[in-house]
Image: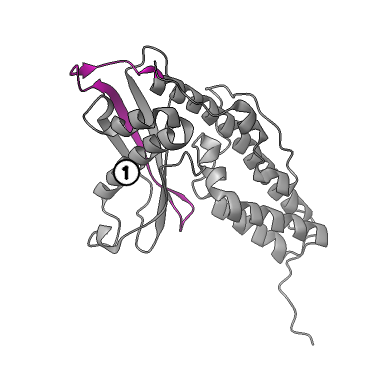
Amino acid sequence: MRAVRLLPRAEIASKRVAGDLIGIPSRRLRSTSTTETPATASLSPRWLSDVKHRIGKCLTFGANDEQIHKAGRVLSEIARDWRELVAGSEGFLTEAKRRGIYRQEVVWGEGDSMGHVNNVMYNRFAESGRVQWTQKLGMHVDPANRKAWRSVMSPSEAGLILKSITTHFKFPMTWPDHYSVYHKLRSEPTSGTSSIVLDVVIMSELHQRPAARLVEDVVVYDYVKGKKIALPPFMLDVFRDTWTLQEEVKGRYSERVRHLLEDVRQLEQGTWDRSDAIEDTGSGAG
């Protein structure tokens, strides 16, 4: 068995989240249940844009200094951490050492005659993201087995073969735009796991929401023996650690989303959503 260097739990817990900067207590959450629904599950895909519009409406009805300060904090949080709020609340790991592709530029030639990114390209984006995702596991999470992780995408030893891929298009990206690709395990692997299902999200940076969601069914294959095998120990340990971290991140950012929405609702109740509210349209009086 190869030695595995896993990310220390103390290191995970000690990382300060941006919530500290907006008055949200930072605390280590226990691993959430696999049945827990992300805070964004029932929200519109455009919920971030909706929040901005809601805050704008609050300001047009007039706000005191405290309300203006709260609105500014919410808008700053969205601008700084929108990827974590959207993808992180679902359990996708967005940090630099874990993400697949980050802010990749959409190339003009990737579009079709309508100017939309061609449907085939989304599968290519996901494939490139999956390769980068596995390679970063070897570089940053398990450097002791970096060589083994490098061979995962080559026909040499134990590798990962794409069995099937399903793509759900949410809206057509166009040029110019940038996109980020995140992968996550759908379930916790066990010692007998011989295939893994990966959820994939391709995020439009321009629109700040998913342009496509994909499901990849990946098989573990031994190229030397020529047959499907269970996850090697080095993969199993890292994927288990990844699963645990996914659940922690989902709970953490779901909590932040709930706090953010509560703040917006309080702003509404203190500005336009009251019986004596009057819209401030400005005055032409000198």
Give the colouring mode of the picture: one colour
Where is the C terminus found, in terms of image quarters? bottom right
Q: Position of residue 106 (x, y in %)?
A: 34, 58
Q: Is residue 229 above or below residue 271?
A: above
Q: Is residue 20 above or below residue 219?
A: below
Say if the magenta span includes residue 6: no
Name the image quarter holding residue 228: top left
Tell me the amino acid under the disc marked 1.
Ser
Give the side of residue 13 with respect to residue 124, left or right: right
Where is the N terminus found, in terms of image quarters? top left
Give the side of residue 242 with respect to residue 14, left or right: left
Identified at 66% across, 57% down, the residue is 55
Q: Position of residue 272 (x, y in %)?
A: 73, 58
Can residue 205 be seen? yes
Determine the secondary structure under disc 1. Answer: helix
Say if the magenta span includes residue 223: yes
Label 1, on which residue? Answer: 128
What is the magenta range?
204-233
Give the side of residue 270 with respect to residue 219, left or right: right
Identified at 55% across, 33% down, the residue is 38
Identified at 69% across, 50% down, the residue is 264
Crowding around mark 1 (Cα neighbors within 10 Å: few <14, some 14 to 19, many 20+) is: some
Name the image quarter holding residue 150: top left
Q: Position of residue 166 (x, y in %)?
A: 30, 35
The residue nearer to you, when weighing 191 against 201, is 191
Q: Is residue 206 above or below residue 143?
A: below
Total label count? 1
